[in-house]
Structures are given as structure tokens and as C-alpha cells.
Image (cartoon, rainbow, N blue to C red):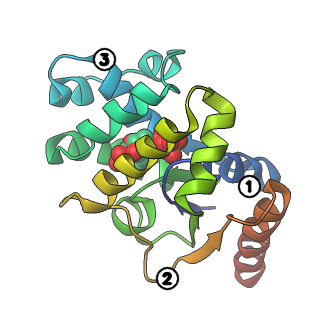
Amino acid sequence: MIFTVAIDGPAAAGKGTISRAVAARFGLRHLDTGLLYRAVGVLGGDPVTAARGLRAEDLARDDLRSLAAGQAASKVAVIPEVRAALVEFQRKFARSKGGAVLDGRDIGTVICPEAEVKLYVTASPEVRAHRRWLEVGGDEGAVLAEVKERDARDMGRADAPLRAAVDAVVIDTSEMGIDEAVARAAAVVEMVLKARR
Ligand code: CDP
């Protein structure tokens, strides 16, 4: 079965949790594409060289989840040659046998426009910043500023900007618990799978 679930959206909207839950529930492989950009960002040196030479162990580093790594990721993610170097790996993963869930910023728009399911998971900047602050601590105002700065860079870049695909189902999790958000996403996947049977 070739079956792709593309999940896009801004930082801390709940994409990661939803993606992992959907993958586990339907027996699909999962790729957090943000890790690719985070790894390129923290590797340092020339980002294009880093993206072209990215190895599996670079994705297993334990410093990829920090706010600094997120910022570094969104800075290298504006470089078209960096994005181009990462396209093939993501496309192969998306169309590999057995089906896959990919979460990121441009999965439904650029990496896999043919995805059978496209979700755009979002929430207000304040709610997203609060969630990220619960994970990382520190000053909540600074976390909100970081979230807004990254949103502006991700949405404003020329190459593969963050936006919902025209055929994406939008899930706004601002006033939703994670269980409800996962249930909504799973219901969409279930509906599409049923229609194919
Ligand atoms: O977990 P969070 O949503 O905060 O971030 P992430 O998904 O790990 O992505 C980190 C950064 O990588 C984003 O702010 C984007 O700039 C970039 N990214 C991208 O450009 N395209 C993707 N498919 C995934 C991430």
C-alpha cells in the first residue's frame, strides 16, 4: 500500500504528537521532517554541505529539540539548496511501501502534493508558546517571541513557505485537548482509508 499522511503546521501546534499517534494507530512509518532541518542547523559549517552529507546518526543527537536548534533550523530552512538536498529522502519515505506519516511545513504543498491525506494543524501563537514553555521552561514572553519570529520566517520565505495546502483539512487545536486533536486526525485518515477499500 502506498499511502501518505502529510501533516503541516507551525511550531508547537501539536503536529508531532498527532503524527506519532496516527502512525501507531494505522501501522504507518513516521518521519518528523523538522529533525532534518534541526540537524543541519546544529551541525554548523556550510549548511548546504551539511544537508548533502546528512547521516542517520545526525538525526539521533540529543540536542535537536532545543529552542536554539529550532531557530537554527528555520534559518537554514530558507536556503533553497538545503531544501533541495533533503527532498529526495523525504519523497522516498513518503511513497515507501506500507504507508507513511510525515510532519513538517511543506509536506502537503511541495514534498508530497499527491498525499492521500493532508492535515494542517494550527493554534494561536499564545497557546503554542504556552505549550512550548511547559516543555522548555524559562521566560514565557521570550518563548512567545521565539514562536512568532519562527512563524514569520517560515511563512515569509520564498521557497516552500508554510501554508495550508488548498485541499488540507485544518485542525485548530487552540481549544482542544490532545486526545480530541488526535481523534479528529484519526477520523480523517479512517474515512480516506475506508473509501479506498
Ligand atoms: O517542533 P517544531 O514545530 O517547533 O519545529 P520543527 O517541526 O522541528 O521544525 C523546525 C524548523 O525547521 C521550522 O521552524 C522550519 O523552519 C523548518 N522546517 C521546514 O522548513 N520544513 C519542514 N518540512 C520541517 C521543518
Q: Is mark 1 within 8 Å of ligand 1?
A: no
Ligand 1 quadrant? top left
Going from the N terminus, do you reach mark 2 or mark 3 first?
A: 3
The residue that mark 1 highlights is 22
Classify mark 2: residues with Cα within 10 Å, few (<14), some (14-19) or many (20+): few
Q: Position of residue 174 (x, y in %)?
A: 68, 64
Going from the N terminus, do you reach mark 1 or mark 3 first?
A: 1
Q: Is residue 22 left or right of residue 82?
A: right
Callout 3 amino acid: Leu
Callout 2 amino acid: Asp
Residue at 17% over, 43% down: 79
Q: Nearer the viewer, residue 43 or 111?
A: 43
Q: Position of residue 127 (x, y in %)?
A: 63, 55
Q: Is the residue 83 above or below the residue 38 in the image?
A: below
Marks 1/3: CA–CA distance:
30 Å
The residue that mark 2 highlights is 167
Residue at 79% over, 55% down: 178
Q: Is residue 21 left or right of residue 153?
A: right
Q: Is the residue 37 above or below the residue 154 in the image?
A: above
Callout 1 amino acid: Val
Classify mark 1: residues with Cα within 10 Å, few (<14), some (14-19) or many (20+): many
Q: Secondary structure at mark 2?
A: loop
Q: Nearer the viewer, residue 149 or 106?
A: 149
Q: Position of residue 171 (x, y in %)?
A: 65, 71
Q: Is residue 195 left or right of residue 72?
A: right
Q: Quadrant of residue 151?
A: bottom left
Question: In this view of the protein, can residue 13 be seen by the observer?
Answer: no
The residue that mark 3 highlights is 43
Residue at 48% over, 56% down: 10
